[in-house]
Image: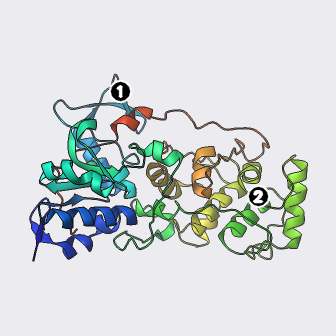
Amino acid sequence: MTLYPTYSKRVSMSRITSSKTFGGLHPKMRDRIQRLMEASGGKVGLGQGLRDPKQQLQLFLSRHYVDPNGKYSYDGKKWSRHQGVAAAVPPGRSMHEIGLAADLVGDMGWVRDNAARFDLQTFEHVNNEPWHVQPTELPRGRSSYQRDPEWGMPPWDGAGGADASPSTPGGSASGGAAAGGALTPALRARPGDTGPAATVMIEALIARELLADADASRDGSYDQADRQIVEDFQRSGNLVVDGIVGPQTWGALLTEVLPGDTGPHVRVLQVTLIVRGMIRDTAGNRDGVYGSATQDVIRQFQTLAALRPDREVGPKTWTALIGEKKRIQVSSGPDVLGGSADDEVDEDEEFDLDDIDILAVMEGRAGE
Ligand SMILES: [Zn+2]
């Protein structure tokens, strides 16, 4: 039986393909990496594919130190890289975290000569990282990719290894997986809908005092009476009157939620997190209080979504939570209609060209 190298030892192909780090890759990446390894006849194996945000944070912290004059921004601080170590991006900025990069081990000459046959580009000439491969047709940097996520965002179909335990007891934080379920298709509510989008829309109408704050309103169904309300709301806001709650209407309905906020607009956020599977559906998680446990969930989500992890739920975070590609321009407070909060600062574009890392020195094995 042919054995393939990992960081620690040589293993069978099935051992690699049943690992989480392989299973969490995008299906096309799984196919390409497996075909490459098989074609190498055991010369090349897998070190790491999917990496969770905690591992990414560890890697980043091991390579950087806080420095007021540093060129990298993370967690509200400036950082510089230790001398002589390779680049590593902070959590939320690596293609590994979304299953679109893999670090190969073994014969790097073979990788260099053959990667293109499998539609993989190596980073040998990008940052002297011959083992790091990504799909040739996608941008190298994660934030570039996420501006136009051609292959979508995780969780991927059939990603057997992906850790899918989205519920967090009492809304408490539980690792990066909490946010994974949120990077899903858009919540767009259409008349007749039942389900997550309708549920969030109803909570938003209640927060706007357009629907009664009563159990009867919360039936999870976008019915004809709701449609009348939505269309009146769209008319009054000079929006397209079509009854469809997409980016524009979400923008008019939703408001910024800040740490410590309380009230019905917070409940809209809580219900969004519930339908996204990020917190449990309990009475306590619908209490209209944006407390520290929920803030932790948002911080993790922001990290995973490559947003500034400031716990403030403004236009960008709402856009990512609702799952729309088009910016949702929410108003800046619960009582203000038509305003615009701006959480657009502090995008670290420098990481676009630096979205790479070295794992050869990291402990880690395929198969974990
Ligand atoms: Zn890598």
Residue under the image location 54 percent in, 33 percent down: 345
Amino acid at circle 2: Ala
Q: How is the image coloured?
A: rainbow
Badge 1 is on which residue?
71
State the mark number for residue 176: none
Left or right, 156 with reference to 86: right
Residue 128 seen: yes
* Relative depth, front residue between 8 and 158: 158
Judging depth in this view, the residue of 302 and 108 nearest the camera is 108
Q: Relative to the observer, which residue lies in front, 289 or 322?
A: 322
Residue 40: image quadrant is bottom left
> Residue beneath label 2, please?
207
Marks 2/1: CA–CA distance: 42 Å
Nearer to us of marks 2 and 1 is 1
Tell me the kind of residue under disc 1. Answer: Lys
Residue 293 percent coordinates (x, y)? 49, 58
Could you tell me which quadrant the C terminus lies in? Answer: bottom left
Relative to 15, say whether 174 is above or below: above
